Image (cartoon, rainbow, N blue to C red):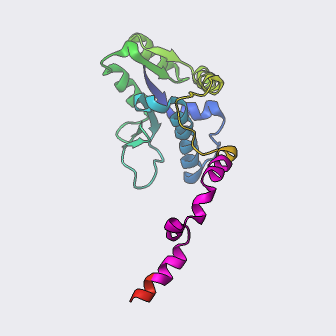
């Protein structure tokens, strides 16, 4: 499934779009949304396109960019993001596999005309929250190596190899400072 999101519409639905957001406020809100999307879509992030109005795009950022797999587009060459979103819907090669996310009736109608899946922003956000809850509820995969060694496992291995520190053949490995002093003596 591919997703086409009306970026500022979703931000408003999230409640993170301040009424008087200056340039830095808009940028923080956009990054907040993109971070949530990256986490929610994980390996499928490449299937997500977010379109933002370009009235106040980030300085020095191109009209299109990749953010951890998510395709981000600023509607620089259009009057507003809605125009660009409608164009993307019209040119979608497989509209039945496209989910359009917006509360804008014009965008929703354009999506329905092409037989896209159409979701309001709140419904989409609820589906993301449900997906995240389900992912947390899944039991851990026993074949996946844990990111760190547990304390009990560390103690076990320290006990197993405790006598190696006293082995004279391995002394230089356990006391590199002494090894360096011996090396200095050779020169």
Is the stretch drawn in magenta largely helix, strand or loop? helix
Residue 4 x/y as whole percent = 44, 26
Looking at the image, the residue that sits furthest to the front is 168
Q: Which residues are magenta?
A: 154-182
Q: On the image, which quarter does residue 186 sit in?
A: bottom left
User: Is 165 covered by the magenta stretch?
Assistant: yes
Check the picture and name the quadrant holding the N terminus: top left
Q: Is residue 145 above or below residue 137?
A: below
Q: Is residue 78 above or below residue 121?
A: below
Which residue is nearer to you in this view: 131 or 104?
A: 131
Q: On the image, which quarter does residue 75 sit in?
A: top left
Residue 101 x/y as whole percent = 51, 23
Give the residue drawn at x 52%, y 29%.
143
Q: On the image, which quarter does residue 87 sit in?
A: top left
Give the residue drawn at x 40%, y 55%.
60
Which residue is nearer to you in this view: 113 or 94?
A: 94
Q: Is residue 165 above or below residue 104?
A: below
Give the residue drawn at x 37%, y 21%.
89
Check the picture and name the quadrant holding the C terminus: bottom left
Which residue is nearer to you in this view: 161 or 83?
A: 161
Residue 111 x/y as whole percent = 43, 16
Give the residue drawn at x 45%, y 33%.
50
User: Is 84 covered by the magenta stretch?
Assistant: no
Residue 115 x/y as whole percent = 41, 10
């Amino acid at each position: 499934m591919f997703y086409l999101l009306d970026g500022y519409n979703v931000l408003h639905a999230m409640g993170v779009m301040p009424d008087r957001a200056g340039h830095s406020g808009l940028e923080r809100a956009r990054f907040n949304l993109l971070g949530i999307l990256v986490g929610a879509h994980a390996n499928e992030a490449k299937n997500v396109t977010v379109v933002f109005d370009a009235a106040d795009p980030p300085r020095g950022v191109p009209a299109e960019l990749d953010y951890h797999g998510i395709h981000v587009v600023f509607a620089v060459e259009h009057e507003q993001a809605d125009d660009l979103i409608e164009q993307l819907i019209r040119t979608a090669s497989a509209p039945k596999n496209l989910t359009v996310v917006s509360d804008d009736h014009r965008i929703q109608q354009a999506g329905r005309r092409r037989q896209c899946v159409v979701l309001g922003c709140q419904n989409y956000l609820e589906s993301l929250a449900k997906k995240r809850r389900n992912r947390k509820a899944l039991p851990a995969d026993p074949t996946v190596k844990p990111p760190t060694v547990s304390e009990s496992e560390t103690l076990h291995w320290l006990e197993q190899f405790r006598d190696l520190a006293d082995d004279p053949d391995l002394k230089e490995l356990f006391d590199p400072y002494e090894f360096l002093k011996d090396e200095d003596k050779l020169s």
